[in-house]
Amino acid sequence: MSIANRKSLLISPELCIGCRGCQTACKSWNQLPGQKTKNTGTVQNPPDLLPNTFNIIRYVEMPSEKDAMRWLFVSRRCMHCGDAGCMKICPAPGALYRTKEGAVAYNKEKCIACKLCVAGCPFDVPRYDEKGKVAKCHLCFDRIAEGLAPACAKTCPTGAIRYGERDALLGEAKKAGYAKVYGEMELEGLGALYAFKDAPKVYGMDEKPAVPESVVFWHKVLKPLAYIGVGGAVAASLLHYVAIGPKKDEEGKKDE
Amino acid sequence: MVKKASAFEIFNHWVLAGSFFVLTASGYAFLFQLEQVGSVFGGFNQMKVIHNWAGVVFSVSLFLTIFHYLPVALRFGSDDISWIIKGGGYLSKKVTVPPQDELNAGQKLYYIVVLVSGIAIAASGLVIWLRPDIADVRKWVLISHLLHNVSFDLMVVAIPVHMYLATLANPGTFRIMVYGTVPVSWARKRHAKWVQRMGF
């Protein structure tokens, strides 16, 4: 899809105060139930994404000699990849689809609950509800279709999550001093851009996120082979029948 | 007429073929998101249910073929090697092949291919369907997805060739899977070692 016309999120962990209004606003808009949790020794709660929790703030402690109290709050959610591994692997038409703003949304009715999408996702994002149907951030597809910002971006008090035109957000990030923005080119451009001051791995993100190689191989080689193979076998059989013909049982011909 | 296939062998073969047809049609529909094929099955959700249970039928049927074919298929000798080198006599109108057993070398190889890829496709299909609750399930789903599709590609090449060789290419063969019997003169030409062993 035309990368320039895409809408995106710009997430700036250095601005995040860990208030987790984003987690709550998302649940409020999508009418998702609360999750019973327990204290695991960190304010990160729940520990990871869930079928009823489409985004979380990851709490990353990074003490160093320079700054013994440095900690980072990093939003984790669907990255709305340009080259989406979930869409690639999905066998059900229309179950996962691209909105006109560039988001990867889903239709639970068309989803067949095969649960392949999380295996195709470089970021381990999709989760599954009690019927096995996919559940993840859909960039508030119903809000953005009406020109509103996603609930998380609307609620964020510090501007750590902002929503807007992709090019504009990239320009602002660069102007704010972020030489490189995570997601600018990765996976044909991520819908969720991250303004990192340090290397991505400091924030717990993959340096080189990619759709799993087996899925790429399947898509590029095995899929075409399914048609070429069967077509070739049928064509070779017809060719053989015409060129050489059947094994007849007359004496002195093909059998001893 | 001599008996070459039992009634159960014939029945089981058609159960295998029928389930394979359902699995392949739905398989292509999933692979290429073919909505027309999906609607024949009553939608993609229902097609998944049908695909999975047809897979169970296929797996049981394939298992039962072991009793009919595996012992013969594993008996490989110099006559079989020679058959293969000569291309089974299929690559020219003039080549003759050495005497063959109840299954010729090509049929033995074909069975091994079907058995191995069938086991692979069934096992990988089971992992994708049941999704065991283990820590690195995504890795196993990816391995299974790959194996499932490699086996699929192998089978959609092997089966059309099998169908051609069992019908047009070798007149007198298809009746085995209908009546279970063949003329003894036909059997003497194609499966001489079997005829000798059986004392027909």
Image (cartoon, coloured by chain):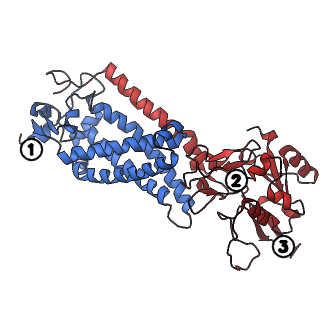
Does residue A119 appear in the picture of this structure?
Answer: yes
Residue type at mark 2: give it.
Answer: Pro
Chain of the residue that carries numbered disc 3 in the rendered image: A
The residue beneath circle 3 is A64
Alpha carbon distance from label 1 to label 3: 84 Å
Residue in front for this viewpoint, A206 or A134: A134
**Crowd class of label 2 (few under 14; some 14 to 19; many from 20; radius 10 Å):** few
* Mark seen at residue A209: 2
Give the x, y percent position of residue A67. 88, 73
**Crowd class of label 1 (few under 14; some 14 to 19; many from 20; radius 10 Å):** few
Q: Are marks 2 and 1 on the same chain?
A: no
Question: Eyeballing the image, is A245 above or below A89?
Answer: above
| Apparent colour of chain B | blue
Residue type at mark 3: give it.
Answer: Ser
Residue type at mark 1: give it.
Answer: Met
The residue at 46%/49% (across/down) is B148
Question: Eyeballing the image, is B155 above or below A153?
Answer: above
Question: Eyeballing the image, is B28 above or below A159?
Answer: above
Query: Label 1 near label 2: C-beta < 8 Å?
Result: no
Residue in front for this viewpoint, B181 or A229: B181
Give the x, y percent position of residue B1. 9, 35
The residue beneath circle 1 is B198
Q: Earlier in the sequence, mark 2 or mark 3?
A: 3
Give the x, y percent position of residue A165. 85, 45
| Apparent colour of chain A | red
Which dot, 2 or 3, sits closer to the camera?
2
Does residue B76 appear in the picture of this structure?
Answer: no
Q: Are marks 2 and 3 on the same chain?
A: yes
